[in-house]
């Protein structure tokens, strides 16, 4: 079976942890152990988040007085793909002796006229006082917005149209390679209408929606979305919290899950199942093998009634 795994950013750096290299290496050791049983039985493509890492690089770039301007987000995203990809490849290489493992820096095509560019919503980088955020917005042309702890830069999160390296990933799978790719949703690029030339854009593509699109294009059998909770919950964090163990795409969408947490994961699972007739699972990293085999997590399946 061909499985696309979408690792949440918290699988690589847990909430509240220092973003030190040693901390991330220890977490990635845990990831490799959790995926090993699946990798021995199935073809795997592993995608991953990069929120904490790109935030750290953006903060360092903004503070670097040697630069006339901070590095753009597309290049920072490429840097995180290389760093996290290297950590994953080295660890998976040691965990799966004899298995081919490769990491690709991949690019995600987005539309230049995507409405998301007019309504940026994705928080990136560090938290500022209001006055500092306003000053940076004037100097650098940023949009800023209020987060839970202060003011931060907000950027667009356009919909993924195509992962440009899909054919290469398909070829690597044909050679028996475990592929790490599409980190952080991929490097967002637009293509010139006449020449096809690519241009990086200041945006962050949702990693789960990119994983769903990649799974669709690779004709995967299963999309596995891994996070830090055992399954999807209705009323999460309330006294009425209830686990959702089995759902169709329509049922999952009716849950109204928040955009900042379970919402994109639920939508990614729903899209993949609707478009392919395959299966998706959402659950905890440690239960990856059990989710695929229907013993844990939330299973998202086609609506066989057609209703």
Image (cartoon, grey):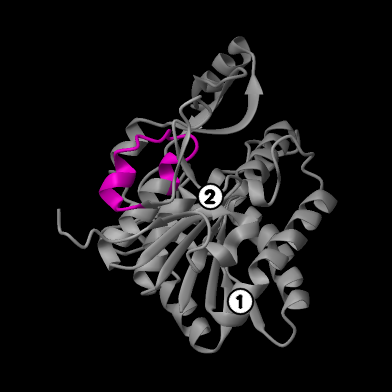
Residue 106: % across, % down: 51, 64
- Write the residue at 77% across / 62% down: 29
Residue 207: % across, % down: 48, 51
Residue 198 visible here: no
Could you tell me which secondary element the residue under label 1 belongs to? helix
> Residues in magenta?
247-265
- Measured along the vertical axis of the image, is residue 89 above or below residue 135? below
Q: Are marks 1 and 2 in contact (CB under 8 Å)?
A: no
Nearest to the observer: residue 128 or residue 208: 208
Residue 222: % across, % down: 42, 68
Give the residue number, with chain letter if any, for mark 1.
Answer: 39
- Write the residue at 31% across / 55% down: 271
Give the residue number, with chain letter if any, for mark 2.
Answer: 74
Nearer mark to the viewer, of 1 and 2: 1
Q: Quadrant of residue 108?
A: bottom left
Mark sitting on residue 291: none
How many numbered marks have been drawn onto this rendered protein structure? Answer: 2
């Amino acid at each position: 079976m061909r499985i696309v795994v979408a690792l949440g950013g918290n699988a690589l750096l847990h909430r509240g942890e220092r973003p030190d290299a040693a901390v991330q290496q220890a977490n990635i050791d845990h990831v490799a152990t959790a995926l090993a049983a699946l990798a021995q039985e199935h073809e795997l493509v592993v995608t991953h988040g990069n929120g904490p890492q790109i935030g750290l690089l953006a903060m360092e770039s903004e503070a670097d007085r040697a630069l006339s301007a901070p590095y753009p987000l597309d290049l920072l995203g490429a840097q995180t793909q290389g760093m996290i990809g290297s950590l994953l490849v080295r660890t998976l290489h040691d965990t799966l002796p004899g298995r081919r493992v490769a990491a690709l820096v991949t690019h995600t095509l987005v539309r230049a006229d995507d409405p998301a560019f007019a309504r940026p919503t994705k928080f990136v980088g560090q938290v500022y006082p209001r006055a500092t955020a306003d000053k940076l917005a004037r100097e650098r042309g940023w949009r800023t917005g209020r987060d839970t702890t202060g003011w931060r830069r907000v950027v667009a999160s356009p919909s993924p149209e195509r992962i440009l390296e899909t054919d290469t990933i398909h070829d690597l799978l044909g050679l028996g390679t475990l592929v790490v790719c599409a980190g952080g949703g991929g490097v967002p690029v637009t293509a010139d209408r006449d020449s096809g030339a690519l241009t990086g854009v200041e945006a962050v593509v949702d990693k789960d929606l990119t994983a769903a699109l990649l799974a669709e294009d690779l004709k995967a059998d299963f999309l596995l979305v891994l996070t830090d909770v055992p399954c999807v919950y209705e009323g999460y964090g309330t006294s009425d919290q209830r686990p959702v163990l089995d759902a169709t795409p329509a049922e999952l969408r009716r849950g109204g899950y928040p955009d900042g947490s379970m919402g994109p994961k639920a939508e990614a699972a729903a899209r993949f199942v609707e478009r392919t007739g395959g299966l998706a699972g959402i659950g905890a990293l440690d239960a990856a093998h059990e989710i695929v085999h229907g013993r844990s997590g939330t299973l998202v399946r086609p609506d066989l009634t057609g209703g």
